[in-house]
Image (spheres, coloured by chain):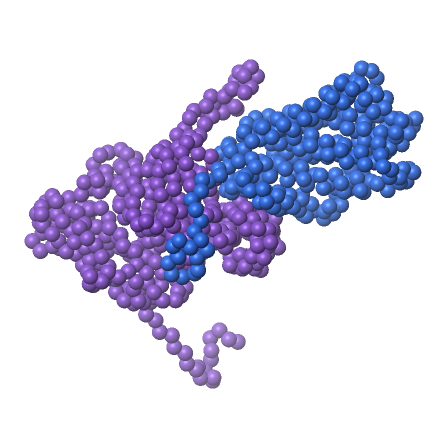
Chain colours: A purple, B blue
Amino acid sequence: MSDRPLSIEVRDVAKSFRIQTDHPADRPRKDKLLHPFRAEHREFKVLEDISFEVERGEFFGVIGRNGSGKSTLLKILASVYAADAGRVRIAGRMAPFLELGVGFNQQQPARENVIMNAVMMGLTPDEAASRADEMIDFAGLSDHTDLQLKNYSSGMKVRLAFSVLTQVDADILLLDEVLAVGDSAFQQKCESVFTKLRDEGKTIVLVTHSMPTVNAFCDHALLLHDGRIDAFGKPIDVSNRYLEVNMRAAAEAEGGRDGYAARFAETIADPPIHIADAWLGADPEQRNSALGSGEPIILNAELEVVRAVERPGFQFKIEDGQGQSLFMGGAADLELEGGHAEPGERLRVRVEVENRLAPGRYVISGGGAQLTSDGTSEPATPVTALNFEVEGTRAEGLMELDHAVTMERIDSDKPVIGRP
Amino acid sequence: MSSAGGAPAIGADLPELREIPGPSAFGTDRTRFWELLWIVSVSDFKQTYANTTLGFLWTIIKPLVFFGVIFVVLRGILRFGADVPNYPLILVMGLIMFQYFQEVTTRGVRSIPNRESMIRKMHFPRIIVPLSIALTATLTLFFNLLAVSPLFFAFGLWPTLEWLWMIPILATLILFSTALGLILSVTFIRFPDVDQVWSLVARVLFYASPVLFPIEKIPEPFDVVMTAVNPLAPLIELARVVVIDPNAPGPLAVAGPLLGVLLPLSMIAFAAVFSLWIFKREAPRVAEAL
């Protein structure tokens, strides 16, 4: 890592919850009367040995399965929960977005809520009041300022909360699953806000379980598994590990050790082919992750064969920043001359895809595959993911498609359908 | 803050690494504490009154109607209190004081779960939640007293210097009610039965306060017990002495210095200290206990 100043420093943090194992309703009444204050508790360790650092201006991803402790970690950072042990230090002011909101009050109008939350996040009441209109405006809710919040749709509430969050001048933003909600217009807005905040040197911690999101935005990432740090580092390595963890869990659910998920998990842990290098663009010396509108997407990869593979292939996938899968290709289209690949051999892969994507941030991920006799394919390497940006001003929609619109006069004496 | 666009200027006005405060009862920044208390109280106040047609008028209508009903029943039907000087005023004063106590404590019980979404998502001094309720109720208390003051003038009572004693009396009432509100708010998180228990206790305390019946109408030794055990009783008795009837028996006359003054005061002081102690102890965990 570079020696940029730290924004967040977490040392040996641990947290457990006391879970009441016998609910009061289940205990015999006599027992309750004799021991009204006694209840069976179980210590449930949610986080253990958590230490990591986030640099200033970094976009940091925290991924993990449900119940892995992601949200608890974020709540400790936000001073909502107290850690049992360890130390957390942060530089500057922090604005949290936890449990899909900032703690709005349903009974009150948007304006009051906005002001109250802005003050909670560190603005003075005067600052908050003077910025309230701007915040409501940014959320696109200027026409509904006086409505009580309970009359808002859930999407409107999230927009409003996000809007407050981005305008309180916080140095660090904590975002829990912000991209999991809202319509695609909101998600696109989030993306542009992320880019802006990053340019302003803000630190952003994003909790998600979407790997494409981590790969598209994050500089570093952390994988939590059963309350411990399972992987830390480059997003692609962390998300590969996450994929493995997920596949193992899926294999367990499948029951057998020979299922697809189990084999996939094994492959990621010990791949027959390594990806030595991968880059975007035609020229390996000029790796470029910004594409003009319509400029083809070129992915290059160099593979190293470790164990013999019968019919090597390559498959890839393009996803947008929210994890929406847009296109998948490769595998069966490809046939390596001679079929068989021997240990020690090096293979070059070149993928060229026409670019009809609307401006925005995308991830192209790919990996080596083995083609099976029945025409399907199985992964042979971990995934590599590269993010790129399609430049241009964003139009509505996901695609840029060739189109033609014409207009001409209709002879006035001819009948026109649809008009009396 | 760095300027928009480009890399952040390293070394320029960078905030230093500082240990996070963690959730707590009081927070670390005093200015922010008062700002937040104010803004949450205003929100609580608006929430209580803004959504009703009569709005804030309810704070005045409620005690007056309550007073009217009790007065009609006791005086008109039961013929009670004819021999007590200014009985309606005693009733009105006692009702307002007790209602304040009841509002702070009963609303205090569920105050933390009622602000759950805020507590689970934001970092702020936790004590602000029950305190904002006490502050709103205190505002209501003063409006109530203001609203019924014409009644006092109508009975020929005009402000005297003696009335200044109401300041320490009300301050003590506010202190005691707020302390109980704090205690109830955190104990409810652990023991949900507190809600039911408290509605019973509050009812009992009402009848154990000289509100419906002036203290001299209560036979010995109940008047002494009442004054000694229920700290609201001496406060209500004192308010009567200083504002309504200087000849009425005060707590000192009823129960003596030990039981009438020292015991109630030490109970109030204990409640105040205990409330801060328990709130401080429980505050860091309230978010996860919800």
Task: Answer yes or no: is residue B239 visible.
Answer: yes
Depth check, front residue: A71 or B162: B162
Residue at the image position 36 percent from the left and 51 percent from the top: A58
Depth check, front residue: B69 or B102: B102
User: Relative to A24, does residue A201 appear above or below in the rendering?
Assistant: below
Residue A349 sits in quarter: bottom left
Residue at the image position 72 percent from the left and 20 percent from the top: B263
The x, y position of residue B283, in whole percent, is 54, 33
The x, y position of residue B253, in whole percent, is 84, 21
Residue B196 sits in quarter: top right
The x, y position of residue B190, in whole percent, is 55, 27
Taking the image as shown, residue A28 lies to the left or right of residue B166, namely: left
The x, y position of residue B179, in whole percent, is 65, 30
Residue at the image position 56 percent from the left and 15 percent from the top: A34
User: Relative to B135, does residue A320 appear above or below in the rendering?
Assistant: below
Depth check, front residue: B241 or A60: B241
Residue B221 sits in quarter: top right
Taking the image as shown, residue A101 lies to the left or right of residue B131, namely: left
Number of numbered discs on residues: 0
User: Relative to A359, does residue A14 appear above or below in the rendering?
Assistant: above
Depth check, front residue: A274 or A310: A274
Taking the image as shown, residue A392 lies to the left or right of residue B74, namely: left
Residue at the image position 35 percent from the left and 63 percent from the top: A359
Task: Answer yes or no: is residue A206 visible.
Answer: no
Taking the image as shown, residue A269 lies to the left or right of residue A132, namely: left
